[in-house]
Image (spheres, rainbow, N blue to C red):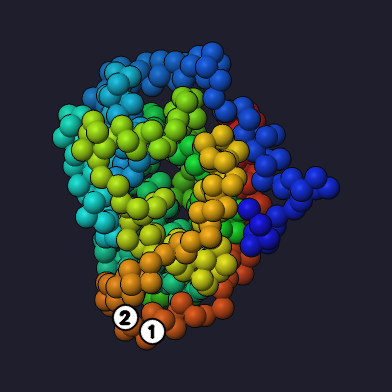
Amino acid sequence: MDTSDADIEFDALGICNHCKDFEKILVKPRYSKKESESRLNSILEQVKSKGKKTEFDCLVGISGGVDSCYTAYLCKKWGLKPLLLHMDNGWNSEIAVKNVKNIVKNLGLDYQSYVLDWNEFREIQLAFLKSSIVDLEMPTDIAIAASLYKTASKYGIKHIISGGNYSGEGILPLSWGYHVLKDEKLYRCIVKKYSKMKLKKVPLVGLRGEIYYKFIKGIKTVYPLNFIEYNKDKAREFLKIELGWQDYGGKHHESKITAFWQSFAMPTKYNMDYRRATYSSQIVSGQLNREKALENLRTLPYNEETVRQDKKYIAKKYGISHSEFEKYLSMPPKTYRDFPNNKNVIELFYALYRKFIG
């Protein structure tokens, strides 16, 4: 990481706040054979016990990426009864679609697709593009969470099994990824200001929804990859060999809009090279050395010809002209700080939740 993160701080030894936070806050889930296996077994027992009388004992969101596909495999291996759910926002790459189909077929698991209303979702995401906020992915992240909660509630499932993990996502500056907080106040503000769309069909969940599903419906999200010796490169090779999985490029590039946004828009418009966060997470978790990461960063994160083709495709899919799309890409960059938000309330809630419930 470097000062492209506006909030980064270095001490006298050159150690940044991200590494300190990782050591202090994230050291608990770091893998250690005896403790981690004990905690994992406890989680699996809870999942099986809560789902003993239901058709499915857990719900797994699957994108076609490494983490979610490997998580689906592990659920099968551990003897769980998972229902796989893919939230389709209209931006899937062909490879991601094939990966989901191969995983479902080869593992013999039940699967559902939660397809968003494209007309409404397009207008919502266009509002975020027009706002110039870096968090173009907020509508997708919120829709994923909402679709998982709604589906879990429908089937009486008490555990959502997530492929999220600290080894690849332990470091991410808030200004680079504020969308992970699922701030409904900011979301509604942007949609209202930059579109005429009424929110009706695309599912939405914010802090109130989280409280409802967690405490009223009793649905808990667990992250098993934090309790195994998870190495993404090894998982990727396993999926290729055993389950017919295909590589789609960079992190989160199973989505065409995500691939374009993270590899091109974020570094060129916002001076945020997403690879820095990914590599930093891998470094502190012992999966990558710093010299190799710095060497990788000397190359461009995007291919210029691919970007040209992507711009044409994205503009057409949004139903706007190429020049209009370029206009939005050239607008002054903004972050969550430029809009009304509930950051302090959300952070307080999750801090208390982690402290007292875990």
Q: In which quarter of the image is residue 285?
A: top right
Residue 320, label in figure? 2
- Location of residue 295 in the rendering, given as x and y in whole percent from the top left corner: 54, 53
Q: Residue at x 61, y 69 (%)?
A: 338
Residue 17, label in figure? none
Residue 325 versus residue 357: which sits nearer the camera?
325
Q: Which residue is drawn at 18% across and 32% down?
A: 106
Bin the neighbour count of mark 2 within 10 Å (Cα to Cα): few under 14, some 14-19, many 20 and up.
few
Q: Report the residue that reaches farthest toward the bottom.
A: 323
Q: Can residue 149 be seen in this view?
A: yes
Residue ID for mark 1: 324
- Location of residue 351 in the rendering, given as x and y in whole percent from the top left corner: 64, 39
- Location of residue 94 in the rendering, given as x and y in whole percent from the top left corner: 22, 55
Instruction: Tell whether label 1 touches label 2 (CB within 8 Å).
Output: yes
- Name the amino acid, label 2: Ile
Q: Is residue 109 visible?
A: no
Label 1 residue SS: helix
Bin the neighbour count of mark 1 within 10 Å (Cα to Cα): few under 14, some 14-19, many 20 and up.
few
- Location of residue 100 in the rendering, given as x and y in whole percent from the top left corner: 23, 43
Q: In which quarter of the image is residue 117?
A: bottom left
Q: Residue at x 38, y 72 (%)?
A: 304
Report the quarter where the C terminus lies. top right
- Name the amino acid, label 1: Glu
Relative horizontal placement of residue 16, taking residue 97 as reference (left or right): right
Residue 34 versus residue 78: which sits nearer the camera?
34
Query: What separation in Å lies between label 2 and label 1 (alpha carbons)?
Result: 6 Å
